[in-house]
Image (cartoon, rainbow, N blue to C red):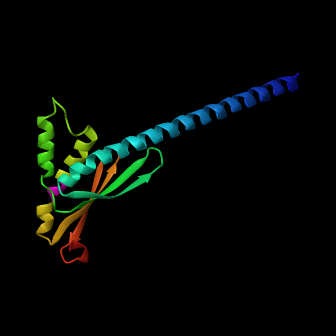
Amino acid sequence: MSFKFLDRTLSSVREASIKIRETTEQAIDVGKEKLRDLSLSLLGEINGLAPILTECGFIIGDINLTLPFPPEIKMSVEQTGEGEKTLEQILAEDNEKAEEEPRLTTLQKTILNSMVKANELAQLTDSYGYTFKRYDIALTTPPKVTIHLISKKSRIYD
């Protein structure tokens, strides 16, 4: 009698194990799909930001995509000094058009605002012989901006 009970218990454990494996595989498939969609969405945000950055005298140097969960996209933005407008002007124009047809998404505004805050440090670092040349922006929650301070004596500064 105890063997029948053991057999039924083992059978139930096997069935539960199969269900868990199937459910896990389905969850992984859904996760991969969501990860792909999120990555494509973030890349779309970056592509929309590229012409705005160019207008402000920046270029996107490269984009790094890391695929853990959640994914992380990093982009390097370099200052060219050839901008027609400042970041502040672009943000102000977008705020004026907010009710009509905003040009920037919420994520793009957050990135530009982060860059503006980083630029506020430029005057301080300039007095120490350093200038901003490149920003690394990690599209995480919240976005993170890393500033590369380049010595004015560096070959990179040219």
Q: Is residue 134 left or right of residue 26?
A: left
Whether 132 is drawn above or below 110: the answer is below
Whether 18 is drawn above or below 85: the answer is above
Residue 105 position by quadrant: top left
Q: In this view, does 139 lie to the left or right of 28?
A: left
Farthest residue, direction top: 1
Q: Is residue 31 magenta?
A: no
Residue located 22% across and 40% down the image: 104
Residue located 42% across and 44% down the image: 39
Q: Does the magenta stretch include residue 119?
A: yes
Q: In this view, does 137 lie to the left or right of 69?
A: left
User: What secondary structure prevails in the magenta region?
Assistant: helix
Whether 10 is drawn above or below 38: the answer is above
What is the quadrant of the N terminus in the image?
A: top right
Q: Nearer the viewer, residue 84 or 104?
A: 84
* Image: magenta residue range: 117-121
Q: In this view, does 98 lie to the left or right of 107?
A: left
Query: Does any portion of residue 141 appear in the rendered image?
Result: no
Q: Where is residue 3 in the image (x, y as percent from the top left)?
A: 87, 26
Q: Where is residue 60 in the image (x, y as percent from the top left)?
A: 29, 57
